[in-house]
Image (tube, rainbow, N blue to C red):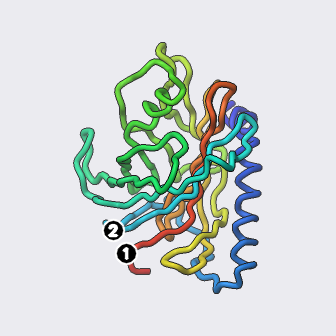
């Protein structure tokens, strides 16, 4: 049942993601840059490890109802890692990032983001579902640690993320869409190709998706589809600067 729902809710996300990867690969080839990066299959349970001082620059757009980018909404947002060992929300080993908007931002945009990257491949974000509820003007709920990825699972496997309605009946489920899919961006100024992992979150009135990589460690894509009353949002990693030695 989970796999069928994933196929139904996430068809547009999967098709868009494949097109994005091809586009990024062609962009790097056309720039005639030297392409570097690991091309080997990644471990079964990838673990993200960011370093204080790392920065992730995203190209961002608002999306229309049909997933089209709205050109006038383009902006850049810079995430800077300020800590990888915070204690927050009852957890330790929290990675904190400060977001700096370079231009007019789409929504959602948070000034401070907090993640926990577990050694078993789970990725948690504090307040993800709360931000989702606020954006869609759904009844509010206190922020919690929401599991936005379970990278140790196999393709097609699902997990429960949480609920988005006040009665607790509209369940957001997460799905592992692909493993070992390749992405391309600039890492420390060098055009780099690397494998990543794609997950989708879906409920009856919401769908979105992420792409992560662990070598280098980064959030590569964040997409949330729009609805008839709410515009979607798209974050694409434009460049990564990292202090971690390769």
Distance, label 1 to label 2, CA atoms, is 6 Å
Query: How many residues crowd around disc 1 within 10 Å: few (fewer than 14), some, or many (20 or more)?
Result: few
The quadrant of the rendering that contains the N terminus is: top right
Percent of width and height locating residue 223: 61, 46
Please name the residue shown 48% across and 77% down the image: 188
Residue 126: name its quadrant: top left
Q: Is residue 246 above or below residue 113?
A: below
Percent of width and height locating residue 16: 74, 50
Please name the residue shown 49% across and 25% down the image: 163
Residue 120: name its quadrant: bottom left
Residue nearer the viewer, 187 or 233: 233
Residue nearer the viewer, 60 or 213: 60
In the picture, the disc for residue 243 is: 1
**Mark found first going from the N terminus, 1 or 2:** 2
Secondary element at image label 1: loop
Percent of width and height locating residue 61: 61, 48
Query: Mark 1 touching mark 2, by CB under 8 A?
Result: yes
In the displayed structure, does residue 193 sit left or right of residue 103? Answer: right
Residue nearer the viewer, 195 or 28: 28
In the picture, the disc for residue 53 is: 2
């Amino acid at each position: 049942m989970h796999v069928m729902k994933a196929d139904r809710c996430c068809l547009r996300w999967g098709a868009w993601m494949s097109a994005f990867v091809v586009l990024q690969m062609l962009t790097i080839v056309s720039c005639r840059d030297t392409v570097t990066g690991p091309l080997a299959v990644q471990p079964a349970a990838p673990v993200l490890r960011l370093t204080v001082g790392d920065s992730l620059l995203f190209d961002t757009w608002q999306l229309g109802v049909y997933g089209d980018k709205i050109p006038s909404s383009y902006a850049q947002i810079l995430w800077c890692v300020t800590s990888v060992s915070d204690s927050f929300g009852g957890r330790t080993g929290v990675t904190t990032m400060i977001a700096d908007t370079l231009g007019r931002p789409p929504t959602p945009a948070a000034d401070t983001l907090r993640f926990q990257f577990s050694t078993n491949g789970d990725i948690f974000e504090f307040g993800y579902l709360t931000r989702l509820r606020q954006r869609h003007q759904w009844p509010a709920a206190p922020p919690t640690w929401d599991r936005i990825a379970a990278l140790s699972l196999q393709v097609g496997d699902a997990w429960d993320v949480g609920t988005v309605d006040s009665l607790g009946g509209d369940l957001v489920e997460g799905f592992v869409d692909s493993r070992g899919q390749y992405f391309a961006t600039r890492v420390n100024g060098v055009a780099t190709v690397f494998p990543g992992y794609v997950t989708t979150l879906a409920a009856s009135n919401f769908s979105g998706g992420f792409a992560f990589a662990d070598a280098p460690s980064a959030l590569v894509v964040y997409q949330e589809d729009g609805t008839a009353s709410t515009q979607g949002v798209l974050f694409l990693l434009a460049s990564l600067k990292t202090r971690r030695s390769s």
